[in-house]
Image (spheres, rainbow, N blue to C red):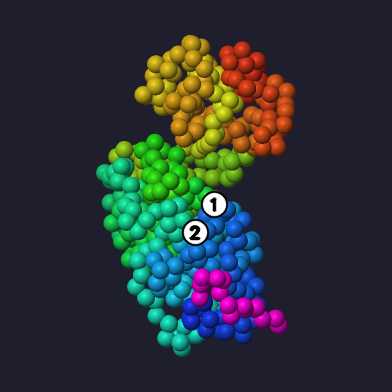
Amino acid sequence: MTKYTVNLSVAPPGHEVPPLLAKFGAWVAERDHGTLGAFDGLAAEAIPSEWSPEKADLLRRAAFSFLSLPDGSLLVLVRTGGKPPFAVALLGSEGETRTVANSLEEFLSLWSKGETEVSELDGAEDSGRASLAAWLKEKKVKVPKAKDFDFSAWLDGETAEAKPSSAVAAPTFSPTEVVAKLGPKVRQLAAVMGRRADSPEVIHYVTEVLGKKLPASTSVNTDSVNVSAPKQGIELVLSHDVLNEAFPPIPKTAKTFIPYVSTAWVRAAVGETILGVPWKAASEEEVTKVLGPPTGRRAAFADEDELTVAYWTWPLDTEGHLELEVEFDDSVSATFSVRHARELARYPDVTTGLFVGYAATRGLLDAERFPTHRELFAAVVKREAQGSQLVKQALPRGLWDDHLRDLPGLRTMAYRWFHNMGGLWLTADLKATFGERRGAFGHDEPVLDNDTWDAVDKAAPIFDQRLASWLGK
């Protein structure tokens, strides 16, 4: 069987291969390929300038790569302050960045446990991880105390003295009665939902209760990060891109953000039931006996119409921002989340303005979602202002499905229409109406440069056809 290849004899100019990495490389060279994960080997190499031409000098001066992943992503060793310990960071093939570990020792320890959050490494054979753990013990490798390093913020220009943004206060919540009915472990989880990652409660919960590494930031290329604790039955999602206006993005640097605990999936390993529902419930009827009739039903997938999945929901705070959902779809699942919308158009363009103008005049927009732009909203309804004006002033984060009225099925249909699902596609309808041309990014687009009311009127027949079920309601 082939072995991993290792080339750590010489570091790129300006760098030295740490003794621990050299020793680890010698050990890896004796391992069978595949036993430690999906990669070909270790090599000390300069970071390609193509990864980020504008950051190339900084990266090459402070870091070098030592492990390449199959998708082209790199693991790099970073001098965070000019002296050990050096951090391990990920340079993703799609431009994503994050800290993997605050030291090489911590990285190897996480690798031996399958907890690096790098799937190609965490998927190593059990025997391979066990061998690594035994090697670390034999070599008496200890994880040093090291200050948490935020690689994304550092790469974006944050200095050691930079302070997280405090312009947006940490949210506070008043729990509803249902929270008191939860078990102690799940109640502890509920208490951190919706909170900022830099809050003491979240820091304690993730690092002490779950024993996991807390992501210090998210970025424009990585808007969410998962923290998985399978032994505790908990998986968290931390994100700065929560489509709820009570949770605005909080900049840390120009391109990084302080995320919120936005979603948590709870599984049987948590060791508690959710409101008394057995995790092994085999039917909807069994769940209904405990919780009563379902709150509603939904399709299993966004492009399906048959409502086959039963769900039960409860608000977790008196403002209605947090929610618990129990679902039955062949088995029981439980989700804690910040209530959020679905995006229709993240980066509004003339098409968005055209639709907003049409929807306003047809009574399909929810006027209550525009409280600080009532006059402009009314002007659009009267065709005295264009939809693009409302989009520009009132929708800085794009058009969401909950900007539409909560009519049965309307928001789901709009989501499909905007996202080319189930045989519906707004762009195709507009190209058929206005003709098509090659766009700036190489894709065909409708011949539409301005959302004038003449343009709205021209599109109205196909819009009316698509939305006939909700007009006049």
Q: Is residue 290 visible?
A: no
Please say whether residue 428 is one of the residues in the magenta stretch: no
Please tell me whether residue 445 is drawn above or below residue 296 in the rendered image: above
Residue 447 placed where, x, y %?
A: 69, 23
Residue at 62% x, 70% y is 38
Q: Nearer the viewer, residue 283 or 205?
A: 205
Q: Nearer the viewer, residue 331 or 123?
A: 123
Identify residue for label 2.
58
Q: Is residue 53 visible from the viewing direction of this image?
A: yes
Residue placed under numbered mark 1 in the picture: 54
Secondary element at image label 2: helix
- The stretch in magenta equals 1-16
Q: Is residue 292 left or right of residue 388?
A: left
**As drawn, 374 above or below 343:** above
| 12 is within the stretch colored magenta | yes
Percent across and percent down for residue 311 are 47, 45
Check the image and name the residue furthest to the front. Answer: 13
Q: Residue at x 52, y 58 (%)?
A: 57
Quadrant position of residue 436: top right
* Residue 117 horizontal side relative to residue 49, left or right: left
Depicted 417 relative to depicted 434: above or below: below
Mark 2 crowd level (few <14, some 14–19, many ≥20, 10 Å Cα): few
State which quarter of the image contains the N terminus: bottom right
Q: Helix, strand or loop at disc 1?
A: helix
